Image (spheres, rainbow, N blue to C red):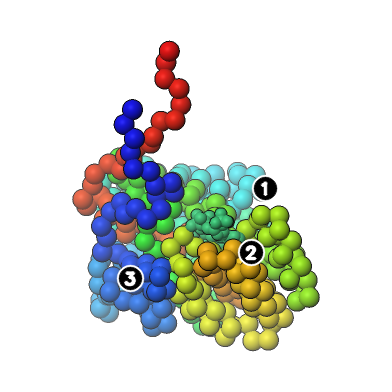
Amino acid sequence: SKQFQLAIGLDGIAVAESDLSLVDGLNGLLVYRGYWARDLAIHHTFEEVAHLLWYGHLPNEQELSALKNQLKQHRDLPEHVKGMLRLIPADVDMMSVLRTGVSALGNDSYGWPPTLEQVISVTAKMPTIVAFRYACLQGREPLDPHPELDHTANYLYMLKGTEPSHAHVRALDAYLILTQEHGMNASTFSGRVVTSTESDLISAITGAIGTLKGPLHGGAPSEVTEMIEAIGTKENAEPWLRNKLENGERLMGFGHRVYKTIDPRATALRVVAEQLSGDDPWFDLATHVEQVGLKLLAEYKPGRKLNTNVEFFAAAVMRAVGLEDDLFTPSFAVSRVVGWSAHILEQAGSNRIIRPQLNYTGKMPE
Ligand code: CMC
């Protein structure tokens, strides 16, 4: 039978043309629509960068205030979604709850083709779903979204129950901006595949959340903090990491399919984490673990060019703003929904169903 060109893991294969982002893995560069992601994280806000990705340009004052208002108007959850979130057993992990909560939003108002209003609506509701569930788990009544606060500040407010400091909002904003978009990563691909069948936006985002959840993609940061906790002391770092590598296991927060040099998001987030952490012994231990990890990866995996990835310092930033481990990956989803939806709009705008091939290696009938 006919054999097709084989690219396991679709490594090195482009499946679309896109105006949204450039991930240059050899030079460690990340561009969103003509701007360095690093500069956007320093000088702009969640809403401004979302506007850039969705509409193609940074907003003027009027456009920004219109987008902020739209997001605020869409933050509340339908009653049936709140009821469902209360019913899910406490031992179901937060990403599964987010996936179910988003899925429950699905109705005719999110039908094909996806629109900017739909996209804004789901982006606005995702932080509310996470914070609602988090409050339920803590045994307190969930807070309504705060009408005066912008997207990131409101997310922190709903999670913690108090208005966050400016420093915490800026730090989390930097993280959420740096992770809004990242080329054809696995979850974005999932979203595009679903959209390519002319299915609805909620189905596409639900698929993307399920894809992000895995530890090889968005599930890594909580495993980074678990690793640092398990290591416990600087002296234990080398034997602990060596033991992992001897057993053929992966070190979380290192390595990337595209980056063969330092992940530029890790570089930017390291600075943010440093500023917030001061002389926090946890951060001191984390940077030691990073150094030992890099040394041992060069020894055990020579020539693979394994570096620290975004998840390593994402864990440090989220921990420093007071988010617990089970909020790390959901917070990643709260940000990446912007990139997913920008891709979904792009895919829908010039669609062809994504339908690759496989090479059959089974038997033929006698
Ligand atoms: N620890 C130890 N060895 C590693 C690691 C690691 N973290 N990452 C890659 N390798 C080894 C791998 O075993 C392979 O070795 P060999 O050539 O002997 O078979 C070699 O390096 C190449 O790895 P690969 O599996 O071909 O790389 P990939 O592009 O398929 O996987 C990855 C990329 C991110 C899944 C992988 O590096 C990994 O599992 N890292 C740990 C999990 C993690 O931190 N994930 C977050 C990724 S960044 C953000 C995101 O995508 O959400």
Of tags 2 and 3, the one toward the viewer is: 2
Q: CA distance from mark 3 to mark 1?
A: 38 Å
Q: Mark 3 and mark 2 in contact (Cβ < 8 Å)? A: no
Image quarter for ligand 1 equals bottom right
> Which residue is pictured at 40% across the width and 70% down the height?
26
> How many marks on residues?
3
**Mark 3: which secondary structure?**
strand
> Which residue is pictured at 72% across the width and 81% down the height?
281
Q: Residues within 10 Å of mark 1 (few under 14, many from 20)?
A: few
The answer to whether 53 appears left or right of 172 in the picture is left
- For disc 1, the marked residue is 91
Which label's residue is closer to the chain start, 2 or 3? Answer: 3
Image quarter in which the N terminus is found: top left
- For disc 2, the marked residue is 300
The yes-or-no answer for disc 2 within 8 Å of ligand 1 is yes
In this rendered view, identify the residue nearer to me: 195 or 310: 310
Q: Which amino acid lies under the numbered mark 1 shown in the image of this protein? A: Asp
Q: Which mark is residue 322?
A: none
Which label's residue is closer to the chain start, 3 or 1? Answer: 3
**Mark 1: which secondary structure?**
loop
The yes-or-no answer for disc 1 within 8 Å of ligand 1 is no
> Which residue is pictured at 78% across the width and 71% down the height?
236
Image quarter in which the C terminus is found: top left
> Which residue is pictured at 42% across the width and 82% down the height?
42
State whether residue 95 is above or below residue 75.
above
Q: CA distance from mark 2 to mark 3?
A: 35 Å
The yes-or-no answer for disc 3 within 8 Å of ligand 1 is no
Q: Which amino acid lies under the numbered mark 2 shown in the image of this protein? A: Tyr
Which quarter of the figure has residue 161?
A: bottom right
Q: Position of residue 119 (x, y in %)?
A: 34, 56
- For disc 3, the marked residue is 32
